[in-house]
Amino acid sequence: MSSIFTGAIEAAIRGDTVSVMLGARLNFTSGAAAYWNGIGPLDATALGGPVFTGVGALGAISDTIEIGTQAATEQLTLTLSGLDVSILAKMENQENEVQGRRAEIYYLTFASDLSAGRPEMSLVSCAKRRTLIMDQMPLEAGPVEGGHKVAISVICEPLLASKNRAPWAFLTNTDQQRRYPGDRVCERVQQLIQKQSMVFSG
């Protein structure tokens, strides 16, 4: 896999027109899928990357990815509008298919060599920039101007995002006894869950 800037620098030295787009490889439990924010398939295997499916006019990847310190807390959203029904199946089973799985973000560098008479853009580098954790996969549906919109998104978070959250746990008498033997504060939690009537007395 190429470095982030090698292909772009070489193209710029030649005087080519250079542009950068984003790609994402989502490691679903049932198998990985890769997408880029262009139109049509993009084969990056010769540069060490995957074959990307374009979300182009139907979807989007967050416009920018920070390189500096801000990147440590930055969230990314990948919108997969209009893709096949397998994406819908993953959304319906996202606890197993999506949440906690890794997403790899790529910089895709393209160059157009006008001096050689090649105005079309060609892929010159595919570099993995960051690894994130997939979190939620919400569905957005509703009327829009000129039709109806159905969009499934994948929200990705930094690897250490959970470190900023307070720890949590369910309160059970068993856990409380393990931590503080003899303590009775949680002995009626099960009755609360079962919605049984409780009478407290001194």
Image (cartoon, rainbow, N blue to C red):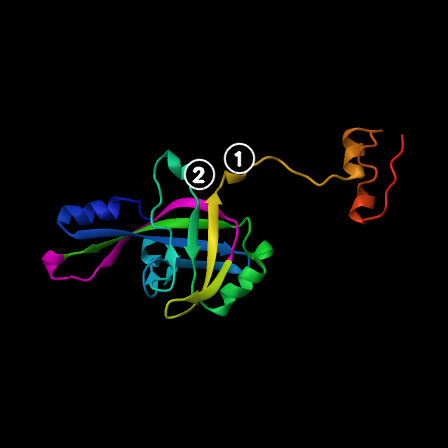
Q: Is residue 131 left or right of residue 47?
A: right
Dividing the picture into quadrants, the one containing residue 57 is bottom left
Q: Which residues are magenta?
A: 114-138
**Element under disc 2:** helix
- Residue 112, given in percent of the width and then of the height, sits at 18, 57
Dot 1 amino acid type: Asn
* Residue 37 sits above or below residue 133 on the image: below
- The residue depicted at 43 percent of the width and 37 percent of the height is 72
Residue picked out by circle 2: 73
Residue picked out by circle 1: 164
Q: Are marks 2 and 1 in contact (CB under 8 Å)?
A: yes
- Residue 22, given in percent of the width and then of the height, sits at 34, 52
Dot 2 amino acid type: Thr
* Residue 191 sits above or below residue 113 on the image: above
- Residue 36, given in percent of the width and then of the height, sits at 36, 57
Q: Is residue 128 rendered magenta in the image? A: yes
Between 131 and 87, the one nearer to me in the picture: 87
**Element under disc 1:** helix
Distance between the Cα atoms at labels 2 and 1?
10 Å
- Residue 59, given in percent of the width and then of the height, sits at 38, 61
Q: Is residue 46 left or right of residue 17?
A: right
